[in-house]
Structures are given as structure tokens and as C-alpha cells.
Image (cartoon, rainbow, N blue to C red):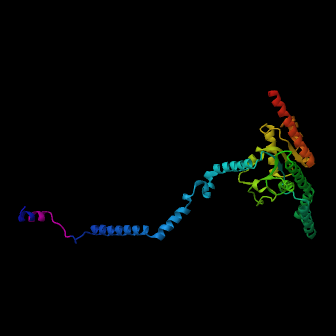
């Protein structure tokens, strides 16, 4: 191509000088420079040992890096309720099996039944307060409650004595029953205390409740459990139970009573004695005969409960029932053979 042809082509397709940039092209150039600078900065961050070590520390502390079973936030979430319930079934089960606990005797009763010395102190305080303000209705009611608490302190003594009898015989090798309570104050404390007095073991199935910040101090440490779910606590109460002894109590005690009776009535639970301690209290509170007269329970259901006012009598009934059951089992095996 000659000189003339090249000039004609240059005129036809003019080119701008490299320094004659349009605004758009100028912006692209600046952005490109910024991008290159950011890239260089990113490269420098990865070479900063302090930043890298800080990031690694945050990784290791991150909840996402935790093993799932060690992540308390995850386990406490609503989505993990089923997992938490399974844990409350499994953990006590494994520990009780490892500790060789095969049979239990349940003791239920009120948290507000206290030992005599404490009841006497409360009564004295109530009398002193009422003396300062004798016309106060609330203080008069408080005095009556304190008088009843002193009267009911005999049930604290009885629960303690019953548990002591059971645990002493267990220590002597006569049976393998272990006392189990809800782990709290009142009758529960008395029962665990009786086992403690005899040098025996006892179980506490505690649950998080207002006003009960910690378990009573007489439970065997290796057999003290804490629950979040009432239903699973009830499961462990009845799973190994050979008998249930119920002392006077409030809503919780009544709830446990009717649950045990329902299991017995429906034959889901076998020949388990249900003993109500404090005949006058229970017969005034619940008219079982009236239920039968109304046709709401059958006549034979009245035999599901027995009343007593003696710790020794209650324990003797349980032993007699167990001996009868053993005899029936042997007879059945003989017939099968």
C-alpha cells in the first residue's frame, strides 16, 4: 500500500490521540485502578498474620463450628424439643441401669409439710405477729395454717420413718427396692432423709419449679436428676415402681395419685400397692365410695387403695403384696412346666 492510499484510509477512519479520552473512558480507567488497589489490599490482608490469627480464633469460637451435640444454643431451640425430650428419657435410664436400680418405691406428698421443730418455730412467729395486731384477718388465717402445719408435721416424721425402714431392710439384703421422690422439700425431703439415716441410697427426680431452687440435701448424689418436662419425670417415676405411698399434699400430689390409680385401673401397671397415708385426711378429701355409688368406678376399683396411719403397717403391706406376687409367679411357672 502506497503513501497516498494510507493517507486516504487515515482520513476515512480518524483515530483520537491516546490522551484525548472521553469522560466514560476516563471513569473506566479510574475504576480499574481502584479495583487493582483493592485487589492489592486483599492480598496484603491475607499476609497480615495478626488478622489471619484473629479470623482463625473467630472460626474456632463460632457456633457454626461447634459439634451439634455441644451447641447449647441449638439444643435450647424450639426445633430441638424432641431431642431434649429424648435426652431426658435416655440419661436417667442409662444412669439407673449403671447403678443397678431395678425396683423403686415412690413416695409422694406435700412440699409444705415440715418437721416439728420448724413448724413450732412458725407457730410461735405467727402467734407473736397476731398478738401485735389481734384484729388482722390475714394474721388469724396465718395462725390457723401454722397450727395445721404443726399438726401435719407427724406426716414428715412418718415419711422419714417409712423410708428408713425400707432402706434398712434394703441394706440388710432383704430386697432391692430404692426410695424415689420428687427431690424437693417437705415429704420428699423426709423420705430421702430417712434413707440417708439408714445409710441407704435414694433417688430424687427434681424439676425446675418456682420456689424450689435446689434439691434437698439427702438424695444420693449419683441418683439425683433434674428434669424440664413433667411427662418424662412421670415416666421415670412409674417405670420401675413396685409400690406408691402418698402422704397428704396439694395439686401435685393429687395429680400423681390419680395418674397411678389410672395406670392400675387400666392394668397398664401390674399389682402395685397404692397406700394413702393419713386415713382421716384422704377419706375427707376424696369420697371413693361415692364414685363407686355413682357408677363412675367399679366396686373392685375401691380395692386399688389402702389407708394407713402406720409406717410399719405400710411397709408390711408392701412386703406381703410382693410375697403374694412371688407365690403367684411360682405357681404360674409350675403350671406352665
Of all residues shown, which one is farthest toward the bottom? 19
Judging depth in this view, the residue of 47 and 25 nearest the camera is: 47
Residue 240 shows up from this direction: yes
The x, y position of residue 276, in whole percent, is: 88, 46
Residue 195 sits above or below residue 328 on the image: below
Q: Quadrant of the C terminus?
A: top right
Task: Please provide percent x and percent y for residue 156.
Answer: 88, 55
- Residue nearer the viewer, 226 or 120: 226
Give the farthest residue toward the front. 173
At 61% from the left edge and 58% from the top edge, which residue is drawn? 73
Q: Assign the N terminus to one quadrant of the image.
A: bottom left
Residue 330 relative to residue 78: left or right: right
Residue 270: horizontal and vertical position, in percent?
80, 38
State which region is magenta: 7-17
**Residue 174 included in the magenta stretch of the image:** no
Could you tell me which residue is drawn at 92 percent across and 68 percent down?
A: 128
Amino acid at each position: 500500500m502506497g503513501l497516498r492510499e494510507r493517507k486516504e484510509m487515515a482520513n476515512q477512519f480518524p483515530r483520537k490521540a491516546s490522551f484525548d479520552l472521553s469522560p466514560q473512558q476516563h471513569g473506566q480507567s479510574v475504576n480499574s485502578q481502584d479495583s487493582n488497589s483493592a485487589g492489592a489490599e486483599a492480598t496484603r490482608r491475607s499476609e497480615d498474620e495478626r488478622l489471619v490469627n484473629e479470623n482463625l480464633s473467630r472460626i474456632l469460637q463460632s457456633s457454626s463450628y461447634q459439634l451439634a451435640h455441644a451447641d447449647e444454643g441449638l439444643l435450647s431451640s424450639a426445633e430441638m424439643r424432641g431431642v431434649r425430650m429424648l435426652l431426658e428419657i435416655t440419661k436417667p435410664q442409662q444412669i439407673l441401669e449403671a447403678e443397678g436400680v431395678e425396683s423403686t418405691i415412690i413416695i409422694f406428698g406435700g412440699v409444705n409439710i415440715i418437721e416439728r421443730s420448724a413448724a413450732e418455730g412458725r407457730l410461735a412467729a405467727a402467734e407473736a405477729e397476731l398478738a401485735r395486731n389481734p384484729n388482722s384477718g390475714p394474721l388469724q388465717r396465718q395462725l390457723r395454717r401454722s397450727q395445721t402445719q404443726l399438726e401435719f408435721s407427724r406426716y414428715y416424721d412418718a415419711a422419714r420413718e417409712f423410708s428408713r425402714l425400707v432402706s434398712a431392710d434394703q441394706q440388710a439384703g432383704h430386697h432391692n427396692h430404692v426410695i424415689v421422690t420428687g427431690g424437693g422439700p417437705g415429704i420428699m425431703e423426709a423420705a430421702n432423709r430417712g434413707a440417708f439415716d439408714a445409710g441407704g441410697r435414694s433417688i430424687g427426680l427434681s424439676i425446675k419449679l418456682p420456689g424450689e431452687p435446689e434439691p434437698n440435701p439427702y438424695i444420693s448424689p449419683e441418683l439425683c436428676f433434674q428434669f424440664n418436662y413433667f411427662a418424662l419425670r412421670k415416666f421415670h417415676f412409674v417405670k420401675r415402681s413396685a409400690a406408691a405411698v402418698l402422704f397428704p399434699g396439694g395439686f401435685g400430689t393429687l395429680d400423681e395419685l390419680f395418674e397411678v390409680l389410672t395406670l392400675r385401673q387400666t392394668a397398664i401397671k401390674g399389682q402395685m400397692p397404692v397406700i394413702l397415708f393419713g386415713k382421716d385426711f384422704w377419706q375427707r378429701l376424696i369420697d371413693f365410695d361415692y364414685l363407686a355409688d355413682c357408677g363412675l368406678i367399679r366396686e373392685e376399683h375401691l380395692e386399688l387403695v389402702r389407708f394407713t396411719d402406720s409406717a410399719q403397717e405400710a411397709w408390711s403391706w408392701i412386703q406381703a403384696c410382693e410375697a403374694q406376687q412371688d407365690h403367684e409367679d411360682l405357681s404360674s411357672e409350675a403350671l406352665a412346666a
